[in-house]
Image (cartoon, coloured by chain):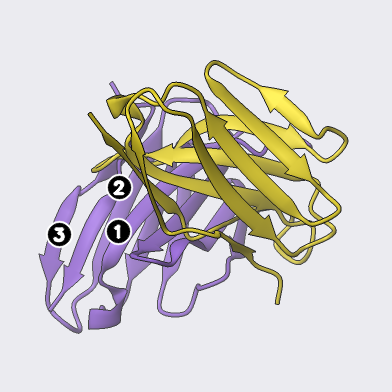
């Protein structure tokens, strides 16, 4: 079983719809992240959370919101999806502490907004 | 702004040859670097990391070289195998406004010819 699980893996929706991507982890890590991947642009950070009560905006947070329901769960919402939010979304976790740069990624959620 | 970039977007090598994937970084404050491998349909996976107090680190069939003078990072893969075909990302740890989060390059696609 995957240590970092994302649902759904694929989703097609229409402009204006609300979408939630969910992430759960069994690694026991405090830190969780949401990244967006677009062809030729690499991975860009949307939001991150260092513990349940800590939520921070990343590089491209506009149009997105997150909720850290528990240490193991971190969800990403698009309140009103638009076509340029079509992308591959990754959840990731990491350990707490200095110089703990290694991220553990989920398998990704491919979102298409028509 | 600071960015992490790659010299070549694609690299094609013959099976058994050595591969070298390059990465340039511009943030002189970064002192931790990671290489990730992303296979088709999967999330990125950690390969190897290096701290700025080192200029070389070796793993199993992989070596990372860091040249701080010219802000250059490279990943060398020895005896490249078909299973090495993937997109490779370098990432640097940003000690600026995003609390030490990783900044990813745009990726290099490695194709291994049998």
Chain letter tied to purple: A
Q: Is residue A96 visible?
A: no
The image's mark for residue A3 is none
Give the chain letter at badge 3: A
Residue B12, percent from left and from top = 34, 45
Q: In this picture, is A20 found above or below A100?
A: below
- Residue that mark 3 sits on: A11
Which of the chains bears the disc numbered 1? Answer: A
First reached walking from the N terminus: tag 3 or tag 2:
3
- Residue A13 shows in the view: yes
| The color chain B is rendered in | yellow
Q: Chain of mark 2?
A: A
Query: Looking at the image, which residue is at 29% across and 55% down?
Result: A21
Q: Position of residue B97 (x, y in %)?
A: 75, 67
Q: In the shown orientation, is residue B93 left or right of residue A90?
A: right
Q: Quadrant of residue A112?
A: bottom left
Check the image and report above or below for B81 versus A84: above
Q: Which residue is mark 2?
A: A108
């Amino acid at each position: 079983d995957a240590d970092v699980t994302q649902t759904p893996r694929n989703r097609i929706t229409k402009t204006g719809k609300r979408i939630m991507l969910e992430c759960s982890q069994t690694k026991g890590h405090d830190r969780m992240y949401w990244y967006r991947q677009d062809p030729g642009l690499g991975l860009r950070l949307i939001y991150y959370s260092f513990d349940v009560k800590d939520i921070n905006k990343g590089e491209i947070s506009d149009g997105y919101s997150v909720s850290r329901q528990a240490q193991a769960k971190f969800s990403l919402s698009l309140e009103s999806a638009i076509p340029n939010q079509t992308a591959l979304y990754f959840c990731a976790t990491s350990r707490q502490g200095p110089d703990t740069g290694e991220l553990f990624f989920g398998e990704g959620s491919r979102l298409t907004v028509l | 702004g600071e960015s992490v970039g790659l010299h070549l977007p694609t690299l094609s090598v013959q099976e058994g040859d050595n591969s070298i994937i390059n990465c340039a970084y511009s943030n002189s404050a970064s002192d931790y670097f990671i290489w990730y491998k992303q296979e088709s349909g999967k999330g990125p996976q950690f390969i190897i990391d290096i701290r700025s107090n080192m200029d070389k680190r070796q793993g199993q069939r992989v070596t990372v070289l860091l040249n701080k003078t010219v802000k250059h990072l490279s990943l060398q893969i020895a005896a490249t195998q078909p299973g090495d075909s993937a997109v490779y990302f370098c990432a640097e740890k940003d000690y600026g406004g995003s609390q030490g989060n990783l900044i990813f390059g745009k990726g290099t696609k490695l194709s291994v010819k049998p």
